[in-house]
Image (cartoon, grey):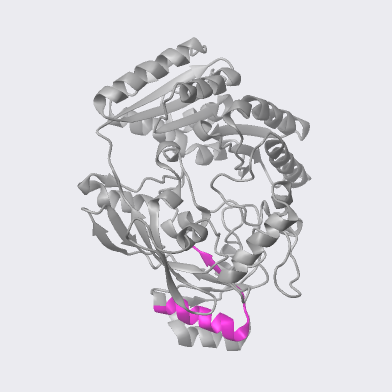
Amino acid sequence: MTDAVLEALRSAIGSDGVRHNDAELRLFAHDASNLVGEAGVVCYPRSVDDVRRVIDVCRHFGIAFVARGAGTGLAGGATPIGGAVVICTTKMNRILDVDVSSRLAWVEPGVLNLDLTRHVGRFGLHFAPDPSSQQSCSIGGNVANNSGGPHCLSEGVTSAHVLACDVVLSDGSLVRLGGEEPESEGFDLRGAFVGSEGMFGVVTAICVRLTPDPLDVRTMLLDFETVRAGTDTVSAIIAAGMVPAALEMMDRLCLQAVEAYIHAGLPTDAAAALLVEVAGAPSAVAADAEAIERIGRQHGARTVRIARDEDERMLLWKGRKNAFGAIARIKPNYYLHDTVVPRRHLSDVLDHVYRIAAEEDLMVLNVFHAGDGNLHPLLVFDKREPGVLDRVHRAGAAIVEVSVAHGGVLSGEHGIGLEKRDFMPLMFSEQDLRAQAWIREAFDPLGLANPFKVLPSPSGCGDAHAHVEGLWV
């Protein structure tokens, strides 16, 4: 980064908001994925005016910028390419307003997901999207990736809970997409922005919908002798007309890793276990829980455990939401995928996943949102082993290809980013991709907002397209 750019940024938002030391540049060269790029400078805006000033500098010098929240993304969406300016929104972390009667709140993008739920809990409300990283991920990042979570099976992903976004575009203008009213006039630009992975601009404020806490909750753990018995139970529950609040699955290796970490009495000898939660009116919860137990036993459930109290319920959920951290007890690195397949093909695709891992001599753990077919295979490895990254990369590509071949899609909640950018032609035609590029250009005609992401070919004039293989570490 040139001295002129650094001086312009310091003049724009103050020296304390601009970082250029080697340690910070290395830290911000990647998100939580296995893809590492190059950060030119890191800026910490504290207000919408700061964001506009940083983008004005980027526009003046023709430098790309990348919005970044907490850095928990898993697809390289916040990985800067070619020395881009990283706009880190973690200091924009205020809950601006809560309207209890209308059940909405305005928040800045750096507010952590779980912090919002804790803040509004005293009103009997919560923010429904609950990624496994909800203790550390930011709402701005949830908006960028249209994040999901276990309880999005019944409540819907982030887009269903965002009413409006204030966004700074690459020309420095501030626009509001959507509004507090149920339906805004014109095109649903809010809907286009949610899930755009930073390619349309930088969000500076978000109006979110808040959800009332359920009157009753029941959390159940069912275990099975085969993975197929578990996935068949999932399909049977949905076919019976029930949509549980959450319907998660863990396989044997995952159960063993989690139990060694949290000591919750998980069935480590089972091939698979389902974590099922039903919520609503007490009578409906009791009826659904009884029906789910019956369906589970019809499909070979060995035991059905029902959490006795809130402490046991939270312990079971701690196991599910800390699964990714628990695998560090096995090996230090993992590659987490995020494909979605039709529920009827869950068993077949999982058979392929196990076979792919075995062929590449890799260990794989499966923990995923079974209710909506959102797979999360964890390839566990030690990157210090010679040649292991090549094997992991091949296995990851094979998992994506087999998922799409079974009628699935590339991502359920992590986004496309850099990780799956070059797989986009598996799902989309050339005309589809061109239409997506046109939408991107409508928001960002200058091509400065998070370039080289999502779309597999450059949309700007003469852009050198980065190869994912060169970033894989």
First to last magenta residue range: 49-68
Q: On the image, which quarter does residue 29 sit in?
A: bottom right
Judging depth in this view, the residue of 243 and 318 nearest the camera is: 243
Query: What residue is drawn where x is 48% and y is 57%?
Result: 191
Secondary structure mainly formed by the magenta segment:
helix
Is residue 194 rendered to the left or right of residue 126?
right
Q: Is residue 173 above or below residue 435?
A: below
Residue 228 position within the rendered picture, expressed as x and y whole percent measured from the top left: 60, 20
The quadrant the C terminus occupies is bottom right
Q: Is residue 195 visible to the viewer in this orientation of the structure?
A: yes
Query: What residue is drawn where x is 62% and y is 78%?
Result: 63
Q: Is residue 195 above or below residue 253?
A: below
Residue 279 position within the rendered picture, expressed as x and y whole percent measured from the top left: 32, 31
Query: What residue is drawn where x is 52% and y is 13%?
Result: 299
Is residue 113 rendered to the left or right of residue 202?
left
Counting the numbered discs, the total is 0
Query: What residue is drawn where x is 66% and y is 61%?
Result: 435
Residue 241 position within the rendered picture, expressed as x and y whole percent measured from the top left: 43, 24
Q: Is 397 within the magenta?
A: no
Q: Is residue 65 visible to the viewer in this orientation of the structure?
A: no
Judging depth in this view, the residue of 393 and 269 nearest the camera is: 393
Judging depth in this view, the residue of 6 and 468 nearest the camera is: 468
Residue 111 position within the rendered picture, expressed as x and y whole percent measured from the top left: 37, 59
Q: On the image, which quarter does residue 46 sit in?
A: bottom left
The quadrant the N terminus occupies is bottom right
Q: Is 62 within the magenta?
A: yes
